[in-house]
Image (cartoon, rainbow, N blue to C red):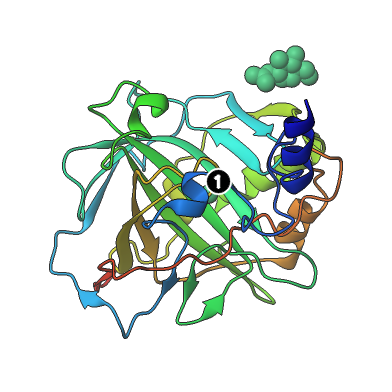
Amino acid sequence: MQRIIVIYLIFPIVLGAEWNYLLNGMDWPDLCATGDQQSPIALDTQDSRILITPRIYFGDYDVPLKGPIFIKNNGHSIQMDIPETINGMQPFIRGGRMEGSYLAKGVHFHWGSPNSKGSEHTIDNRRYDAEMHIVHRNAKYKDIVEAVEKEDGLAVIGVLLQIVEDPTDIPTGLTKVINAVVNIPIDESNTTIPAGFTLDEMIGDINHNDFMTYDGSLTTPNCHEAVIWTVFTQILPVSYEMVSKLWELRDHWDKKMMNNYRAIQETNYRPVYHRMGNA
Ligand SMILES: *[C@@H]1O[C@H](CO)[C@@H](O)[C@H](O)[C@H]1NC(C)=O
Ligand SMILES: [Zn+2]
């Protein structure tokens, strides 16, 4: 009993019911602390290898999703499940540095606060307002639980969002998802929205062929080193009004859900590649 109490006093945050972002993950234990292929990292377009590789193929990203689409406040972000398309297919990606196909399973976000930016990756030492992650699972594994144990288990697309004054063409699907967050203000609340939009309509028209890619980890506990990361170099312009809806959410402790991004991790001599390409 004594020992348990002492340990709890040393690691009160981590041993609590749920991890948090008070130190942007600097206090997370286990692989999050000991891993050497962790994410996010500082991406540097000048100091990266040029990658001669096929573009990424976005399969069924242009086919409307079948509704209703489930969105949940999970206490540290908002999580949208990606259903099948109206053709009964799961959207997928292949190409780039991936072998085989990776099925699109979920979308979630990281963000800052009214006075701080909250993307996870930085590009050329610049942090952006928010970051959208589209999580894909290697089709050869049966579920996420199995995939997180494999170094080729997951492929995540990162899209950096920047608040600009009069954004034109905010993607319609992204707008629908963010508009729905008023219905899930607190931890464990959920909602559904009608479908009728495609994954392309979550990303919009930014260049899909110019990206940074490297091997890394989940950016939440347990920080499994199972992710082939692809971060688009082009930034998606969004409105203040849109991002400010995220600042209204409440987290697992009923505190404002803000700055839910993990601190930059050591690159540790990992190769980071830049694929340059036109739209
Ligand atoms: C969604 O929320 C309802 C209560 O509002 C709850 O009964 C249900 O279990 C939740 N579903 C999931 C999958 O979290
Ligand atoms: Zn994420």
Does the closest atom of ligand 2 sit within 8 Å of the Cβ of label 1?
yes
Using the rendered view, name the quadrant where residue 56 is placed.
bottom left
At which x and y percent is residue 239? 68, 66
- Label 1 crowd bin: few (<14), some (14–19), many (20+), radius 10 Å: some
Locate the C terminus and report the quarter of the image it occupies: bottom left
Using the rendered view, name the quadrant where residue 36 is placed.
bottom left
Question: Ligand 1 is found in which quarter of the picture?
Answer: top right
At which x and y percent is residue 171? 54, 55
At which x and y percent is residue 143? 37, 23
**Left or right: where does residue 278 sit relative to residue 10?**
left
Which residue is at the front of the view, 261 or 192?
Answer: 261
Residue that lies at the very extreme toward the bottom in this rendered image: 46
Using the rendered view, name the quadrant where residue 96 is placed.
bottom left
Eyeballing the image, is 142 above or below 110? above
Locate the N terminus and report the quarter of the image it occupies: top right
Residue located 77% across and 50% down the image: 257
Eyeballing the image, is 234 above or below 186? below
At which x and y percent is residue 190? 72, 27
Eyeballing the image, is 133 above or below 210? above
Residue located 67% across and 74% down the image: 166
Q: Is residue 86 visible?
A: no
Which residue is the site of mark 1?
220
Eyeballing the image, is 182 above or below 258? above
Q: Secondary structure at mark 1?
A: loop
Report the number of numbered marks. Answer: 1
**Left or right: where does residue 72 sit relative to residue 154?**
right
